[in-house]
Image: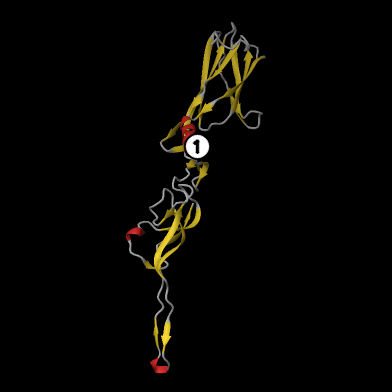
Amino acid sequence: MCAGMDASAPEMVRVRVEDAVLECEEGRLDHCVGETRYFFANCSDEPVTVRGMSLGEPGGRRSTIYDFANDPLAPHTVWSWKTRVHYEDSLQLRVDVVDSHDVPIFIAELPVRTSNPAREAAMKACEACGGTWGIQGLLYRDACNCRARDAGHECHDGDACEGVCKFDHWAISQPAQPARCTGKGKQRTCTARVLAVGRPVGHCSAQVAVRSCHNLLKRGITSEPEQSLPWGTTHMCID
């Protein structure tokens, strides 16, 4: 580390930070973890000591402070330390180093870079499907809600859409008939009211996943004969 480093750094001490690459559980972008390693090199001919280190947001808003009780770092040796990383936070590393007389000789401030290839790939795929990226549902997980390829198409079954089939109206094949009565007194006769017969009709949702409450067509109703209305729909609330 003492050779070929940034010439702007002091000659006595060099600090290097490895970029962290997060790895996620299959299908779980909220369960990601990586590792960042920090290297401290004493490039001088005298021992030095890493007195403290902090990791915080740029601007000093929040930070985690690590206190060290290390033995002095011998000349021309390297000491390393690591932390686990769970988020793609933008952090700043600050390192305080003192010489053998406990006099501050070096303060390093370096960015800590973190990448999440799985999330980046998922967001790129979300953009390609015209979706909306963000927190989805009550589980509060980052995910994509793709735009349905059949958005707005007419549908007659809950299985017909990439997303869901939202109820619009009834397609009536036999109109309803009101009750009818003829005659008077004991000769008066009445026919029963006849309900309309038909099928529910809907349209495919704009996105694959829907939230809130909707009137939806049930699945598999195209295999059933027409029935008296209303039938074939359900009121569903989805979180």
Residue 75 relative to residue 236: left or right: right
Q: Whole-percent x and y of residue 25?
A: 42, 35
Q: Whole-percent x and y of residue 21?
A: 48, 27
Q: Which residue is mark 1?
A: 127
When the figure is inspected, residue 200 is found, relative to residue 107, above or below; the finding is below
The three-letter amino acid code for the residue at tag 1 is Glu
Residue 170 relative to residue 49: left or right: left
Query: Residue lying farthest top?
Result: 45
Q: Quadrant of residue 149?
A: top left
- Name the colouring of the figure: secondary structure
Residue 96 relative to residue 141: left or right: right
> 218 and 117: which one is in front?
218
Q: Secondary structure beneath disc 1?
A: helix
When the figure is inspected, residue 184 is found, relative to residue 208, above or below; the finding is below
Q: Whole-percent x and y of residue 161?
A: 41, 50
Q: Whole-percent x and y of residue 91?
A: 59, 28
Residue at 57% x, 9% y is 43
Query: Residue lying farthest bottom?
Result: 185
When the figure is inspected, residue 6 is found, relative to residue 30, above or below; the finding is above
